[in-house]
Image (cartoon, rainbow, N blue to C red):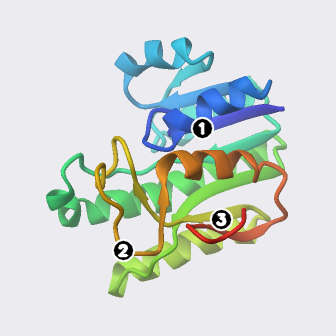
Amino acid sequence: MRIFLAGATGVIGVRVAPLLVGAGHAVAGMTRTPAKAGELRELGVQPVVCDVFDAGAVGGAVAAFDPDLVMHQLTDLPDDVDQIGDYGERNDRIRREGTRNLLSAAAAAGVTRFLAQSIAWKLPGKRGENTAAFERLVLDTGGVVIRYGQLYGPQTYYPDAPPPPPRVHVDEAARATIRLLDAEPGIVEVVEGAEA
């Protein structure tokens, strides 16, 4: 399968990419950071440096790769968990505008399989409404919404001890994602104690 992975250098993407390559898939990995292109090449991934907010560039990149599936693993979150509140609108914009651009690019390229990461816990107020609207965008186009529990393990906000549920180890989240490539449209929870 040919898979266009947006967010290939994120916490989940950097784990999913080598699993996909190892399973024999051809993978294009999108990152907005030119310096990360080399990391992707080392993983066996074709790097695509592109800003998800540039709809034309996203459309061109997806069309050029001609994928069977587009996977959306993009977020805009800080490295420091104490700053997460300051990044709410930035992350919501990725989910709102970035998702629309990826969905439009997929549709224009004739791609019918779309997987997107979401969260398995509820956010209050406007943040929760924005998450629900993002999920509806994906579901309305026949996509799969993957609701991950809070990630823990290396390079997460919880490297040493698990957070409260819903949670999932980041490596298990990546392995579960690979099992969802052929999932039926809808919502799937990837949390400890659930089968994906």
Number of the label disc, if any, that sits on residue 16: 1
Judged left or right of residue 56, residue 152 is left
Residue 145 has which mark?
A: 3
For label 1, count other residues whose C-alpha is less than 10 Å away and answer few (under 14), some (14-19) or many (20+): many
Q: Earlier in the sequence, mark 3 or mark 1?
A: 1
Q: Dividing the image into 4 quarters, which one contains the N terminus?
A: top right
x and y percentages locating residue 76 in the rendered image? 35, 50
Q: Nearer the viewer, residue 87 or 17?
A: 17
Q: In front: 103, or 177?
A: 177
Residue pointed to by mark 2: 164
- Answer left or right for 75 relative to 20: left
Disc 1 residue type (three-letter):
Val
For marks 1 and 2, give the one nearer the viewer. 2
Give the CA separation, mark 3 to mark 1.
Answer: 16 Å
Where's the C terminus, which quadrant? bottom right
Seen at 70% across and 43% down, the residue is 70
Question: Does 110 sit left or right of 43 as displayed?
Answer: right
